[in-house]
Amino acid sequence: MPRPLRVCFIAYRGNMACGGQGIYLYFLTRELARQGIEVDIIVGPPYPDSMPFAQNVQLLPNQEHWARWFTRDYAGMIPAERGLSALSPLHLYELGASRLGFLPEPFAFSLRAFRALASRLRKGERWDLVHDVQCLGYGVLGLKAMGLPVVTTIHHPLTVDRRASFVRDETLRDAVGTMSFYPIGMQSFVARRIDRIFTSSNESAATIARDFKVRPSQIHNIYNGLDTDLYSPDESVPRDPYRLLCVGRAADPNKGIRNLIRALALMPPELKLTLVDNDHPGNEVFKWARELGVADRLHVTGRIATESLVDLYRGSALTLVPSHYEGFGLPAAESMACGTPVVASRAGALPEVMHLCQGGLLVERDSPEALAQGVKELMSSADERDRLGRTGQKRVEAHLSWRQIARVTAEGYAEVLEERKGLPTTTITSDN
């Protein structure tokens, strides 16, 4: 009987609260383990929740200089209790890069991960493959140089975030900061040299190929996964027939929230919008709503628990996704998984997701008029909303559950290993 496949995941941030990479790491590794693959994890802070399904979880600490710089905790960037350890070359690099406005985590973590894996290889441990989660630091190439097959996941390249940041920038200094912050040169260099890139849509695949100069044949579209046990219908949750829901940050130009507020002003007055976003008074969405006379029809939730978000999906009449760009469009998929239809912009990967799941309709991008008309169309027929809700839920379950995504990912691993058949798994030998 052949031994189970053994895969080592490396991720520079692992907590689910810190973004999509933490969610991806947790649920994909859990499902792969359920399907018989042995999973090891090497991860940086913020660390993930307990992962009992993994063979081993190795935590790689850093001094979180960038997080302290971002929150302006400058005094905490060199904690006195850590003494001389703060003077190690890697710590000094992270300190200096953070103070200059660079993002040092991917590079620094990749070197720590390389060092950790090399040490364990010398002690006799073996892996069939390494799966990098959106790090793409130079240390990843060290793993490949040791003979390990390496794949990576890129939900969308950092060039997308950089373009959105340029839209927000108001001064030349802001623009210079944006240009220097993102480690695009490093990530594109590494991406072109590893065995396979997994991504979440054909749109993202095309963007990666164009912006990172990667061969299209090197990229494999697997889609994002959903916890369809959690994101699911619940008839005990009452549905508000006049509530529209949107999950997106007004501070991110790609989310199209300003156009959403303009569209709200064109909709029937009985419709109200719940926006899952920061509820700080400085959030510009409040100013936009006041200017258009719809402030009394807008509710901004602030930070909410995942269970509360699920109930918002279940209890809303429609979910709106007015984005200018999406590498996948997770709120659309989450809403359809809960049986709530979606009105989404024809932007980025949203047409793919909506075509795959068939739980709503698409409207012209960046058009408040088209968005308002799409809402009016679906709000005019409860039967059509019910039909779309049932169809979307079934198709999300069939195509986007983590069980399905793990199965397709494992097939991707098999393709990479087949291509490399005959090559040594590692060139490092045990010290024993």
Image (spheres, rainbow, N blue to C red):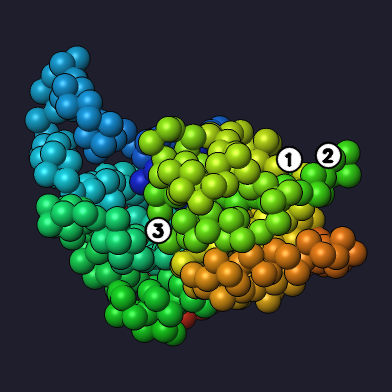
Q: Earlier in the sequence, mark 1 or mark 3?
A: 3
Q: What residue lies at 49% left-to-right and 70% top-to-bottom? A: 366
Question: Element type at marker 3?
Answer: helix
Q: Which mark is residue 237?
A: 2
Which label lies toward us, 2 or 3? 3
Residue 429 in the image: state x and y as whole percent: 31, 55
Q: Mark 1 sits on what residue?
A: 311
Q: Quadrant of the N terminus?
A: bottom right
**Mark 2 and 1 residues: CB-CB less than 8 Å, in contact?**
yes
Tell me the kind of residue under disc 1. Asp
Residue 97 in the image: state x and y as whole percent: 14, 44
Q: Earlier in the sequence, mark 2 or mark 3?
A: 2
Residue 230 in the image: state x and y as whole percent: 73, 44
Q: Quadrant of the C terminus?
A: top left
Q: What residue lies at 32% left-to-right and 70% top-to-bottom? A: 191
Camera-side residue of 345 and 291: 291
